[in-house]
């Protein structure tokens, strides 16, 4: 195996096909550290053969919740990570033929743990900032198409994401993120 550890994600005892937490090897010494955040050969060796076409980066303050977003006709796979601070990152399976359709998985990504989260095409994605500030970077497998954007309400009880919102945290949403529909209004949902 190369310089990464790839862990499949599970919910209710079922593996969520295509969803992975990726941990790169961190080389540390007295000067600091070095890490390869993406190496195509290591990814291919691990069975991940996606091609990335766009890199994005954002900065957000504590309590900002971005999501849950998806592209309708031009879905994007995303390799996401926190490069400063900490976020709770969530993926919701929107693939109707999946055993985990409608299920969510969340992972804490921090600058310290250097974990990455690969979210394949066919998922809604969002994150909550846990630290005072966080910088978030991600690679995408398709370009962003503004007219193709969709979303799910972040606190939809049908999905039931357990966001780690603390008493001292005010959830900050964009206007569009307050207006997305619920899962069962947008998709046929059967538990």
Image (spheres, rainbow, N blue to C red):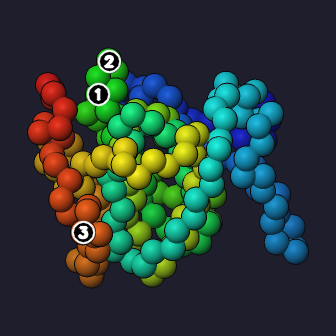
Helix, strand or loop under label 2: loop
Viewer-nearest residue: 150 or 159 = 150
Place of residue 21 in the rendered image (x, y in percent of width and height, measured from the top left): 55, 42
Q: In this view, does 183 lie to the left or right of 13?
A: left
What residue is rendered at 88% in x and 74% in y? 31
Which residue is labeled 3 in the image? 175
Relative height, residue 26 to residue 9 (above, below): below
Residue 145 relative to residue 29: left or right: left
Residue beneath label 2, please?
97
> Where is 137 relative to 184, above or below?
below
Q: Please tell me how crowded label 1 is: few (under 14), some (14-19), or many (20+) other residues with Cα within 10 Å.
A: some
Q: Which quadrant would the C terminus be assigned to in this image? A: top left
The residues bearing labels 1 and 2 have C-alpha atoms spaced at a distance of: 7 Å
On screen, 44 above or below 36? Answer: above
Badge 2, how many Cα within 10 Å: few under 14, some, many 20+?
few
Question: Is the residue under label 3 in contact with that under label 1 (CB below 8 Å)?
Answer: no
Can see residue 115?
no
């Amino acid at each position: 195996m190369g310089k990464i550890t790839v862990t499949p994600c599970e919910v209710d005892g079922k593996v969520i096909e295509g969803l992975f937490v990726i941990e790169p090897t961190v080389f540390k010494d007295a000067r600091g550290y070095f890490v390869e955040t993406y190496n195509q050969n290591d990814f291919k060796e691990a069975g991940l053969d996606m091609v990335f076409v766009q890199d994005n980066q954002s900065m957000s303050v504590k309590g900002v919740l971005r999501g849950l977003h998806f592209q309708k006709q031009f879905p994007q796979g995303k390799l996401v990570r926190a490069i400063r601070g900490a976020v709770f990152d969530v993926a919701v399976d929107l693939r109707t033929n999946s055993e985990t359709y409608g299920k969510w998985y969340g992972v804490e990504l921090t600058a310290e743990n250097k974990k990455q989260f690969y979210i394949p095409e066919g998922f809604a994605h969002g994150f909550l900032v846990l630290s005072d500030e966080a910088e978030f970077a991600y690679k995408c497998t398709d370009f962003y198409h503004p007219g193709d954007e969709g979303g799910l309400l972040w606190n939809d009880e049908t999905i039931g994401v357990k966001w780690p919102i603390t008493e001292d945290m005010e959830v900050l949403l964009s206007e569009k993120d307050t207006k997305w529909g619920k899962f069962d209004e947008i998709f046929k949902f059967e538990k």
